[in-house]
Amino acid sequence: MPFRLHLLAAALLLAMPALAQNDSHRLILKDGSYQIVTKYEVKGDRVRYYSTEREDWEELPKSLVDWPATDQYEADRAAQKASPEAAQLDKELEHERELEAAQLPQVAPGLRIPEPSGVFLLDSFQGTPELNEIQQSVGDVNQNRKANILRGAINPIASAKASIELDGSHATIQSHVGVPSLYINIDDAPSPAGQPSVTVDSPRRQQPQQPEQPIVPFDRFRIVHTEVKGNKRVLGDIKRNLTGKVSQDQHYAKTTITRLAGGWFKVTPTEPLQPGEYALVEMSGKEGMNLYVWDFGINPKAPANKNTWRPETKPNAKPK
């Protein structure tokens, strides 16, 4: 933010507690939290609202809303908007936000990555591009036996094998296309753009434990095909042989990895993935695969994902 904006914000700080977006409101809840909304309506014992943050229609019980606090916030906000200084600051802050948003990668016409970091899957549902944010899941090594397998706490003359598992038979995010693109930025420091794409060409690879070496960026992220067993998804196996050497065994998909502006990486399968469950994994040097992964599925018949971003979504869009 330019220095003059800081001065203007400081001058207004005592006169107003906060500045909201011009077209947004707040539903203040009884637990002290709130939802930023474009509009809302009360239907019986439910409140239906359009989330400004997630650009989608949602609802919650009417009894959870602190209506006196919500009404007071709207009254205070109306008084603030009457100030010409506040209006000018709103305008300049909005311009700054637009400039910042323009720096984020565009993944489809009218659709940019909405956040400066995270992991997003580009899908297509009923012919419309959609961005889905994927949250991390943690893999469990055969009922928390990771310490035994990786730290040598087992009998060194005996062999051992354990599975890396995720809870549940399906991931929350399901891609409706077989070639989704995954956009990744989990680092603080941005990387330059313009680097060439490379291909990870081993659909199944065993990784013996080696002396630690730097992980080059294009070897860092891979897509693993998981095997569903009951209410678990198996990411791969950890094996320890008679000499004590530890290795990991996973089913990798063939992918192309491209470095983008702002520290982003784009990972795309080079051929359609078969319907099933997958995970984006991060490789961690001699330790092998990081157990914190981003899981997703491939299912053309899956219902629509929730809280997606679409091209040029309008706040006054009709409810689905």
Image (spheres, rainbow, N blue to C red):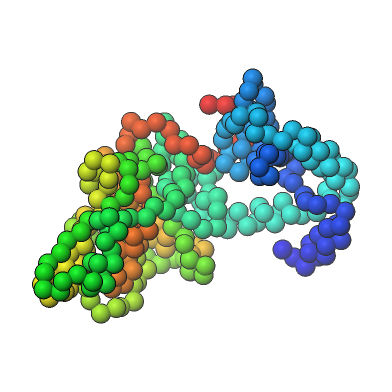
**227 shown above or below 305:** below
- Image spot of residue 263 (x, y percent): 48, 64
Q: Is 292 on the left-hand or right-hand side of 132? A: left
Quarter of the image holding residue 65? top right
- Image spot of residue 156 (x, y percent): 15, 74
Q: Nearer the viewer, residue 79 or 43?
A: 43
Q: Is 174 on the left-hand or right-hand side of 22? A: left
Residue lying furthest top in this view? 44
Q: Nearer the viewer, residue 169 or 66?
A: 66
Q: Nearer the viewer, residue 25 or 301?
A: 25
Question: Which residue is found at the position 72% from the left and 63% from the top?
Answer: 1
Quarter of the image holding residue 277? top left
Question: Which residue is found at the position 74% from the left and 46% from the top?
Answer: 20
Q: How many marks?
A: 0
- Image spot of residue 186 (x, y percent): 47, 62
Question: Which residue is found at the position 51% from the left and 58% from the top?
Answer: 117
**239 shown above or below 92:** below
Q: Is residue 142 visible?
A: yes
Q: Is residue 197 visible?
A: no
